[in-house]
């Protein structure tokens, strides 16, 4: 293990980690938005919306995220969609994880006791008021940990954008392997940084989960 080399290059890896963090934050935000819309469609009374929601989940969970990123980045220009590598990575990963978050959010809503809905309707609340004031606050507590799992998977999945030359952790490791011929050290260093990011994210999820259970 060449520790001297790792100490020399780690500042560049930390800079790349900021790109990984930026990717993670943006794709998480997009994924949550897609997940919320997808879950609303899946739970809608409209047959068309339910079919659209189911199709979204089926397509984006049934095909590799890397293929989706390639379609956006390499195939987009053929249909008039011009995206840089970073933008294609954010949209590709965000829409992909959104399909998983759709089922996470929908599952949490379904898990709330139906008696809560019946009680709220008995009190005169409309369907939208029941969802907003009764169901969603309870479902939010149930979905924190599963969404945390989705986010952790997403953070690791950001490595896929190295395939379209986004300079994040994995791409940086590959680049330095070409000049140092030390693949073990480079990937080990990248792996440690990924673990730290995921560990800190896990602490945040646990904190949110504890707060939700107290309130």
Image (cartoon, rainbow, N blue to C red):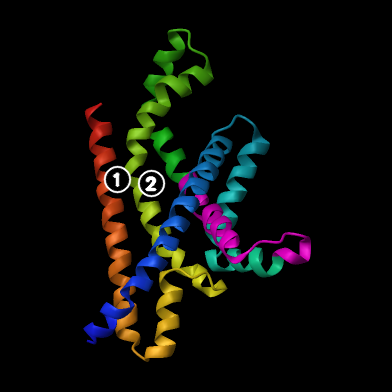
* Left or right relative to 160: residue 76: right
Along the line of sight, which residue is nearer the eye, 193 or 79?
193
Q: Where is residue 100 in the image (x, y as percent from the top left)?
A: 47, 51
Q: Is residue 195 above or below residue 202?
A: below
Check residue 96 for magenta coloring.
Answer: yes
What's the CA distance linking mark 1 and mark 2? 9 Å
User: Residue tagged by mark 1?
Assistant: 205
- Residue segment shown in magenta: 76-102
* x 27%, y 61%: residue: 196
User: Residue tagged by mark 2?
Assistant: 147
Q: In this view, does 81 lie above or below 187?
A: above
Q: Quadrant of the C terminus?
A: top left
Q: Where is residue 177 in the image (x, y as percent from the top left)?
A: 40, 86
Q: What element carries label 2?
A: helix
Residue 40: give its label: none
Q: Where is residue 122 in the image (x, y as percent from the top left)?
A: 44, 9
* x 46%, y 23%: residue: 132
Along the line of sight, which residue is nearer the eye, 209 or 183?
183
Q: In this view, does 174 lie above or below 24?
A: below
State yes or no: discs 1 and 2 in contact (Cβ < 8 Å).
yes
């Amino acid at each position: 293990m060449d520790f001297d080399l790792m100490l020399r290059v780690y500042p560049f890896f930390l800079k790349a980690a900021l790109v990984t963090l930026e990717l993670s934050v943006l794709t998480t935000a997009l994924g949550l938005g897609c997940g919320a819309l997808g879950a609303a469609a899946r739970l809608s009374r409209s047959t068309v919306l339910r079919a659209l929601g189911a199709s979204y989940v089926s397509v984006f969970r049934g095909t590799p995220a890397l293929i989706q990123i390639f379609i956006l980045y390499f195939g987009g220009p053929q249909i008039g969609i011009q995206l840089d590598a970073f933008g294609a990575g954010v949209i590709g990963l965000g829409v992909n994880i959104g399909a998983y978050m759709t089922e996470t959010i929908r599952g949490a809503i379904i898990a709330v006791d139906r008696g809560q809905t019946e009680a709220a309707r008995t009190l005169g609340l409309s369907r939208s008021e029941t969802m907003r004031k009764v169901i969603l606050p309870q479902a939010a507590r149930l979905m924190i940990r599963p969404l945390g799992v989705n986010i952790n998977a997403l953070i690791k999945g950001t490595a896929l954008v190295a395939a379209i030359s986004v300079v994040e952790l994995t791409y940086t490791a590959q680049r330095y392997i070409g000049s140092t011929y030390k693949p073990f050290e480079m990937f080990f260093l990248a792996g440690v940084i990924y673990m730290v990011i995921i560990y800190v994210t896990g602490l945040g999820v646990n904190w949110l989960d504890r707060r939700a259970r107290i309130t």
